[in-house]
Image: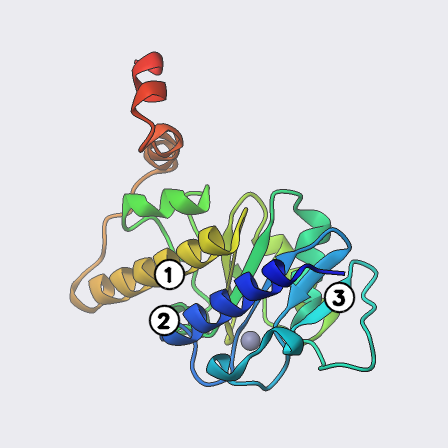
């Protein structure tokens, strides 16, 4: 059973996601790993109204208590990410405007800015389309997430993960900014895309960024 502080942290993250404007209405969802499985936001509850008792604890086997709220319809994507990606401590799913716009074109998000290195990969892939809430969609998302902390979802939205709730939200926000920058650049010309080598160089720098001692030791 999750601790109260684990629940409160997820309530705070859900409110932060709602307040960020990243995802309209009750769309999107957020979860965190627990020792048994995960805690995930419920289906159909406005972010500002979510309380600790509304959160659903889903085991990695896919079981949850039939007495409480129903988990988000995309619980399977969250569960499958925790199963496949040991580094995932939290997962955010959003229908953010610019990621969703690119996803409607079924376009990947290329390296229009070096900040794409926060995803750990030189491009954010777009997962193939499948109906929401299906196993097929979850499989497509996992495939698109390979080697990356984020992906778009065709005609749907985006997914981001990280070691913590704060980190996953940060990746989601950063990817949405990149998607807007790409979209804006496309309005006026053909953006120059950074090559994979440059993005991995930046990713290396990020590992020591904000850690001056380690950076000095490496230099
Ligand atoms: Zn969705």
Mark 3 vs ligand 1: CB below 8 Å:
no
Q: Up-down: is 138 above or below 207?
A: below
| Residue 83 percent across, percent down from the top left | 73, 51
Marks 3 and 1 sit apart, C-alpha to C-alpha, by: 26 Å
Dot 3 falls on a residue whose secondary structure is: strand
Q: Does 200 appear above or below 135?
A: above
Mark in the foreground, 3 or 1? 3
CB atoms of marks 2 and 1 within 8 Å:
yes
Residue 49, given in percent of the width and then of the height, sits at: 51, 84
Percent position (x, y) of residue 26?
A: 51, 83
Which residue appears at 74% of the width and 57% of the height?
37
Instruction: Please tell me which of labels 2 and 3 falls first in the chain.
Output: 2
- Which label belongs to residue 173? 1
| Mark 2 or 1: the one toward you | 2
Q: CA distance from mark 2 to mark 1?
A: 9 Å
Q: Which mark is residue 80?
A: none
Instruction: Answer left or right for 139 relative to 66.
Output: left
Relative to 53, say whether 128 is above or below. above
Report the residue at 53% width, 61% height from top. Answer: 9
Where disc 2 sits, the SS reads: loop
Whichever of labels 3 and 1 marks the residue nearer the N terminus, that label is: 3
Report whether residue 153 is seen. Answer: no
Horizontally, residue 64 falls left or right of residue 167, namely: right
Q: Secondary structure at mark 1?
A: helix
| Mark 2 vs 1, N-terminal side | 2
Q: Quadrant of residue 209?
A: top left
Q: Quadrant of residue 7?
A: bottom right
Query: In the picture, which quadrant includes the C terminus?
Result: top left
Which mark, residue 58?
Answer: 3
Residue picked out by circle 2 = 20
Q: Is residue 97 left or right of residue 49?
A: left
């Amino acid at each position: 059973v999750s601790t109260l502080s684990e629940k409160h942290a997820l309530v705070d993250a859900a409110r932060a996601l709602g307040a960020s404007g990243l995802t309209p209405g009750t769309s999107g969802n957020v979860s965190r790993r627990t020792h048994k499985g995960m805690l995930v936001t419920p289906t159909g509850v406005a972010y500002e109204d979510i309380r600790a008792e509304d959160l659903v604890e889903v085991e990695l086997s896919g079981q949850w208590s039939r007495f409480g709220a129903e988990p988000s319809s995309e619980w399977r994507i969250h569960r499958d990410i925790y199963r496949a990606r040991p580094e995932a401590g939290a997962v955010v799913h959003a229908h953010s405007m610019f990621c969703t716009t690119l996803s409607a074109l079924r376009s990947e998000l290329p390296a229009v800015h070096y900040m794409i290195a926060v995803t750990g990969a030189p491009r954010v892939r777009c997962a193939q389309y499948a109906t929401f809430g299906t196993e097929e969609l979850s499989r497509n998302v996992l495939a698109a997430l390979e080697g990356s902390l984020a992906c778009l979802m065709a005609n749907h939205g985006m997914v981001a993960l990280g070691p913590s709730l704060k980190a996953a939200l940060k990746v989601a926000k950063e990817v949405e900014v990149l998607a807007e920058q790409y979209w804006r650049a496309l309005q006026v010309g053909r953006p120059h895309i950074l090559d994979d080598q440059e993005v991995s160089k930046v990713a290396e720098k990020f590992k020591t960024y904000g850690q001056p001692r380690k950076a000095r030791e490496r230099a």
